[in-house]
Amino acid sequence: MHHLDPALQPLYEQVLQRNPGETEFHQAVLEVLDSLGTVVRKHPGYADARVIARVCEPERQIIFRVPWVDDQGRIEINRGFRVEFNSALGPYKGGLRFHPSVLLGTVKFLGFEQIFKNALTGLPIGGGKGGSDFDPKGRSEMEVMRFCQSFMTELYRHIGEYTDVPAGDIGVGGREIGYLFGQYKRITNRYESAVLTGKGLGWGGSQVRREATGYGLVYFVEEMLHSKGGSFDGQRVVVSGSGNVAIYAIEKVHQLGGTVVACSDSSGYVVDERGIDLELLKDVKEVRRARISEYAQERGAQYVAGGSIWDVPCKVALPCATQNELDDDGALALVKNGCVAVGEGANMPATPEAVRILREAGVLFAPGKAANAGGVATSALEMQQNASRDSWTFEHTEERLAEIMRGIHERCAATAEEYDVPGNYVLGANASAFVQVADAMIAQGVI
Ligand code: NDP
């Protein structure tokens, strides 16, 4: 199926053999290696320095037991992970995911992607990711707190402002970051603000961090549409998911004059032809932590249990839920219904087959590691504010975010041109980020 450059094939085989069963990690590595064939043909030095092989091997992988006691007094055991993948550009940086599907391979795929994403921001952050197979759904506030405290009781020894700085991801939002920070502070007796990002606004958090991934995604896609003379104004848009990334993507699309007519959760999707009512959606999802079916019921909108949200006709599709949620069938449906652009808000939401179908049909495609980098970029701005004991206004921070996203778009587009594949943002993102990380690693010796 894939025609990797012959110079990279043995390396990919070694990755498969060394990391058995980690299919998501294999998929993420294959996508990057696919782009790097073009890079090593132009610059063979990277193959000679074995820097690609080094990038595929995490610097450190930590796995730990997380025991805690539920509200019935039962002892629960979860597994915790932190993969510190690459620190060539700065301290490891990347979120924590709490979801029952989390395995080591999940965290490795996310950590690997994070290296390149963080490089693209132009800010001094390395790549890492962590999480647990803990399922927060249906858990009480106190159970979530006890879990977070137990998780941090081990994690604290591996992280730090200059070492590794976690943030949120699926299942980890402001509430969980609060409990994690509180426990870190108790154990270490240090008010080390920049050890975690995504903190509350009153205690070291940054304006716009909550909105950053969704807003940044929409800025990136708007730039992509501009490059073809288009924009979000007047467009029908579909956004999958209804979590942090999805909600603020919807908000920004509406601010730019588009209409989001559908969103989803893991149980089903809602179609709301009048445009999603964000106040109601935020109340259902952020305050009540309820299902999207409740939104549909209260709003009088259509609800489809299960099914594929990609069957809903749209001009722009923004997958913002989870990996591999947009497959070949979804891509074919989007193309058939006249979709012109897809932007990945989630990490690796489109399968390789879906990406191929979209690109062959001439659909503009923004890969997650470029398009969703606004979240981690704003986390890096939070670290900057913490380091200078300062806090910036919403307007100033949002302007910085917008500037960073325009810069990432420009960098990906220019790199694609340089390698003679104009408009190929996947290659543009992978090649540009890899070269920056590789040059730093080579300069730092055999590391
Ligand atoms: P949230 O937990 O806030 O929301 C996740 C959303 O996706 C929920 O609507 C959830 O539905 C749905 N979802 C999760 N897992 C599945 C699944 N297996 N099948 C179907 N739907 C699912 O997470 P975020 O919004 O923070 O993250 C969404 C994506 O964006 C992830 O891929 C994440 O890695 C990526 N991302 C997040 C960043 C951030 O700053 N938060 C930064 C960059 C990328 P349900 O409630 O039913 O579980």
Image: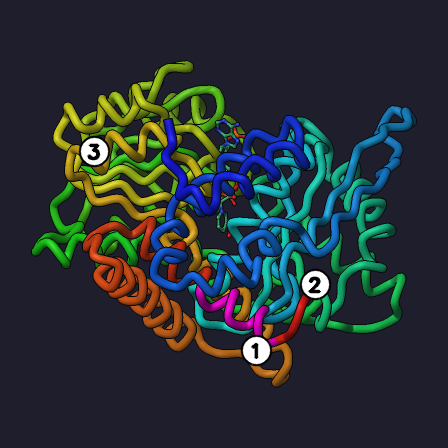
Magenta stretch: includes residue 240: no
Q: Residue at x 63, y 60 (%)?
A: 86
Q: Between residues 294 and 383, which one lies in front from this camera angle?
A: 383
> Marks 2/3: CA distance?
44 Å
Question: In the figure, is residue 67 to the left or right of 63?
Answer: right
Q: Which residue is mark 2?
A: 164
Magenta-colored span: 435-443
Q: Quadrant location of residue 160?
A: bottom right
- Which is nearer the N-term, disc 1 or disc 2? 2
Q: Which residue is mark 1?
A: 384
Q: Quadrant location of residue 51?
A: bottom right
> Marks 1/3: CA distance?
41 Å
The answer to whether any part of residue 282 appears in the image is: no
Q: Residue at x 59, y 49 (%)?
A: 56
Q: Which mark is residue 274?
A: 3
Query: Which image quadrant: the N terminus?
Result: top left
- Which is nearer the N-term, disc 2 or disc 3? 2
